[in-house]
């Protein structure tokens, strides 16, 4: 694994980032690890950024003013307000450099120390070994397998349901 770039900067995403984020979210490797469909209009990313929920946190990772990663928390409501769904994507050309770890650590720190979120939950395709290893190192455990969860490359694929519970 390459060393984390000293030029890596984690910050809040802004609506002004929409074009760079639309590009990132449409990269083949990013798209295959998410539920995003091909040929999504870039303006949908702008709309998503403009209409985030009040309990949502979206951050980006930048290297030399290039957005190389995206991560976020979507806080649940009502009797599940102690929980948030986590999602992350790293640019295809910047993987295995510690960017995912930096994004994940930033979200965990915010959830634990600023937002009072006790449960972080996510789904990850079962063949995404790098992401699964990262999540396990951060204290996530597999709670189950969701069979035939999503269509990917013409086949129904399984995902792990994982969660991290702050004690």
Image (spheres, grey):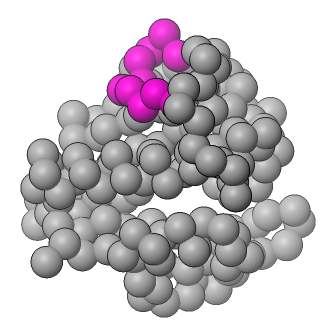
Pick the front one: 70 or 109: 109
Q: Which residue ends up furthest to the right in the rendered image?
A: 154
Residue 54, visible in the rendered structure: yes
Q: Position of residue 132 (x, y in %)?
A: 58, 73
Residue 42: quarter of image: top right
Placement of 157 over or under 76, stated as above or below: below
Task: Specify whether residue 11 is painted magenta.
Answer: yes
Pick the front one: 167 or 83: 167
Q: Position of residue 156 (x, y in %)?
A: 77, 75
Quadrant the C terminus occupies: bottom left
Placement of 146 over or under 30, stated as above or below: below
Query: Magenta span covers which residues?
Result: 8-17
Residue 149, visible in the rendered structure: no
Q: Residue at x 22, y 41 (%)?
A: 55
Q: Residue at x 49, y 22 (%)?
A: 47
Judged left or right of residue 52, residue 34 is right
Q: Position of residue 124 (x, y in %)?
A: 58, 69
Q: Residue at x 62, y 47 (%)?
A: 3
Pick the front one: 89 or 8: 8
Judged left or right of residue 27, residue 22 is left
Task: Specify whether residue 52 is painted magenta.
Answer: no
Quadrant the N terminus occupies: bottom right
Q: Position of residue 62 (x, y in %)?
A: 55, 26
Placement of 19 over or under 90, stated as above or below: above
């Amino acid at each position: 694994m390459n060393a984390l770039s000293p030029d890596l900067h984690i910050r809040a995403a802004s609506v002004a980032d929409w074009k760079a984020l639309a590009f990132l979210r449409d990269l083949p490797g990013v798209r295959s690890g998410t539920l995003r469909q091909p040929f999504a209009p870039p303006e949908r990313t702008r709309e998503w950024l403009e209409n985030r929920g009040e309990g949502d946190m979206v951050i980006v990772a930048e290297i030399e003013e290039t957005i190389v990663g995206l991560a976020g928390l979507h806080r649940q409501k009502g009797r599940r307000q102690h929980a948030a769904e986590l999602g992350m994507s790293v640019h295809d050309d910047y993987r295995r450099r510690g960017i995912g770890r930096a994004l994940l650590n930033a979200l965990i720190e915010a959830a634990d120390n600023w937002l009072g979120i006790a449960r972080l939950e996510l789904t990850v395709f079962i063949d995404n070994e790098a992401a699964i290893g990262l999540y396990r190192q951060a204290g996530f455990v597999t709670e189950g397998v969701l069979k035939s969860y999503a269509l990917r490359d013409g086949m129904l694929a399984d995902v792990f349901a994982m969660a991290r519970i702050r004690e």
